[in-house]
Amino acid sequence: MANHLHRNNIQSNHSSKLVGGAAAPHPSFPFARAAIPPRAATRMAAMLSTVLSAGLLAASLAGCASAPKEILHSSAPALLAGVSPEMNSPGFWIAAHPAPDAPVLDAAGIERLNNRTRETGLIRDLSLPIKKTGEELAKDFQGTIDWISKARIYQSNGKRVSASFMEPIAAQMNSGSIPAIVVPRSGFLAERVNCRVLPTNEGLFDEPGDVYIDNLQASSLEPGTAAIVLHTSTDGAWLYIVTELISGWIPASSFAEADLETFLARYRSANQLAVVAARADLWDDENNTVYAGYLRMGSSLLSLPDGEENGGAYRRASLPGRSPDGVYIERIVRLRAEDVTEGVLPYTPRHIYEQAFKLLHAPYGWGGLFGERDCSQFLCEVFSTVGIVLPRNSSKQAQTGTALVGFTKDADPEAKKDLLAAGALPGATLLRLPGHIMLYLGTANGEPMVIHSTWAYREPRGRKEIIRLVNRTVVSSLRPGSGTKKGSHLERLTTAAMLVEPEPAAIPAIPAIPERPISPDNSSQP
């Protein structure tokens, strides 16, 4: 799991805290002291102006001998250093861009970019067969158990993860019943779900009293997500799935099975609507009074002919549903016409700025928890609206497109600034440091500026360092973290990836995505 358990730096990625035949049915549990440093974590409401606590849930649990000690941090200011109020508007950046309405890529170029991302193994094409032996899948499961067992992480009651916690979960994984050749089942998610690293809703956390960043959260998945089932838990309550972007366990009750022909027809359908609102409310009735949930930015629905209602203010669309016997059906929903677009938006800097700033100040959500987003999911949602499919974690997102020539992690900070100003494409360049990723907006007052969903950053305070909680999507410079042991975001930048068509040799081939659940980076480091 790339960058999965890091906490000495604060910045996440799930991406984002910014601070700055078959296996044996009884797997082994090597509970060794972790060599991997624990990851910083916390999830709190956005825009808090007071000191925050991450120990409330644990303190309320019955049966604990004593409540874990609360973890307290100070909040960051509403405007981070170097940011003016005008910079919190997309218009500021649109006006500063030399060609805000010029297409970065046309439809054919976007398709070539997406194909290249698939060919390098960064995302999956679910229309292709998944060939997996039972032995391989069981080995993946055992690998997941091994790294969790060795990590220094804690249950919500403050106790270190142990065999008594892991053994029942390992039994649920049902490795002994995996057939020699896995037979995939295709379908769609009929509701929003949390995709879990293990078949449990119990969490594992970096420190006692810190119960908001859950190591077992792989990602949240939207209604309508296409998925392939590879395995079922012992009690039948969980399914192990793969999607285009992630692998993990979901509740079986959320999956609607479709035969392969039906699945492929919908999966490949060009008759799509893309959600362009931060959230699009769904309604079950023509008067729009029976609430049916919501979809996040970048989600898709099927467009229906003659779908306009209420004088064009609303429209009907189709979303995967689930029959009582678990079979895929289409359900009709209604939503505001302005919340969706036919197909996708043109890939221009103006549209990227406008979409990104619709999420400004949205709360941070580790792995998509609480219906929110982390740094890599923020980018997935924004770029989905123009048809670009990004991987779910920041390390893989940074391998998408083409790297800025000459930009290296060891370059002098001032040299990095010069390279960004001279060669990076504002609104189309991703900037990554370990465990975190950001969207490059351009320069202001000689400083490179970014927008990102982030957790916190470190700040010097006398001889010590403190953590300042941001916990939302913000505009910032790359100066947070200056003067700390880890350094500023600028000092720690490793990659500048431009989402343009790469040359065939620009991105080396990498191994196919392993089926073991891997959270979207999940490293949190201020």
Image (cartoon, grey):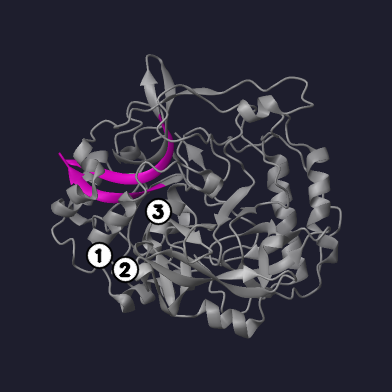
Which is nearer the N-term, disc 3 or disc 1? 3
Q: CA distance from mark 1 to mark 2?
A: 8 Å
Q: Is residue 291 visible?
A: yes
**Tag 1 and tag 2, C-beta contact below 8 Å:** yes
Identify the amino acid type marked 2: Leu
Identify the amino acid type marked 3: Ala
257 w.r.t. 445: above or below: below
Q: Mark 2 Cα within 10 Å, few/some/many (few <14, many 20+)?
A: some
Q: CA distance from mark 2 to mark 3?
A: 15 Å
Which residue is tagged 1?
A: 348
Q: Position of residue 365 (x, y in %)?
A: 50, 44
Q: Is residue 398 visible?
A: no
Q: Which residues are magenta?
A: 437-457
Which residue is tagged 3?
A: 278
Q: Residue furthest top?
A: 462
Q: CA distance from mark 3 to mark 1?
A: 19 Å
Q: Nearer the viewer, residue 471 or 464?
A: 471
230 w.r.t. 89: above or below: below
Dot 1: what SS?
A: loop
Labels 3, 1: front one:
3
- Residue at 78% of width from left, 44% of height from top? 166
Dot label at residue 21:
none
| Predominant secondary structure, magenta span | strand
Labels 1, 2: front one:
2
Identify the amino acid type marked 1: Thr
Q: Nearer the viewer, residue 436 or 418?
A: 436
